[in-house]
Amino acid sequence: MRLPRAGASHTHDPIVTAPSETRLQGLSAAQARERLGLPAWARVAGYVGRFSSEKRVQQIAESINWLPQDWHLLFVGDGRDKIEPSDRVHVLPPTRNVGDIWRACDVAVVASEAEG
């Protein structure tokens, strides 16, 4: 479903702004990483959601093998699929306060077969 951009003349405008309840608390990325137990110097790819096969979380976790050594993966959530933590793969339980999570991440990862 596409949302019309504010002031757009039609619903197929490619720019979409969705409201967010996420409030970043003014932390730097390094501060957010330290708060979450991640190295302050790391590059971080983050996934927040349900751990299940249709979300392809195992494939995301395996991607660490192809990333440069300064990259870490951060998974936040839970579900049927279990993510095995390692020195570069970090797993945290679900939280309502995702501001620090997103502040700590350089990129968000979505690999879902359905939904996005």
Image: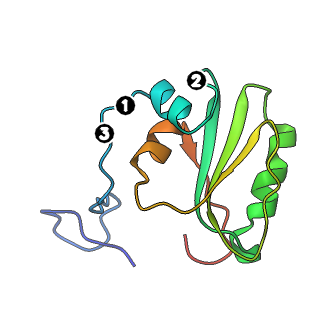
Circles 3, 2 touching at the beta carbon (< 8 Å): no
Left or right: where does residue 91 sit relative to residue 93?
A: right
Which circle marks residue 27 in the picture? 1
Which circle marks residue 40 in the picture? 2
Determine whether 37 is above or below 53 in the image: above
- Residue beneath the point at 31% across and 39% down: 25
Type of amino acid at the residue the image marks with label 1: Leu
Which of pointers 3 and 2 lies earlier in the amino acid sequence?
3
- The residue lying toward the viewer, choosing from 103 and 93, is 93
Where residue 95 sits: x, y (%)? 48, 60
- Residue beneath the point at 22% across and 72% down: 10
Left or right: where does residue 27 sit relative to residue 51?
A: left
Rate crowding at label 3 as few (under 14), some (14 to 19) or many (20 or more) other CA atoms within 10 Å.
Answer: few
Circles 1, 3 touching at the beta carbon (< 8 Å): yes
Left or right: where does residue 106 sit relative to residue 103?
A: right
Which residue is outermost to the left?
A: 7
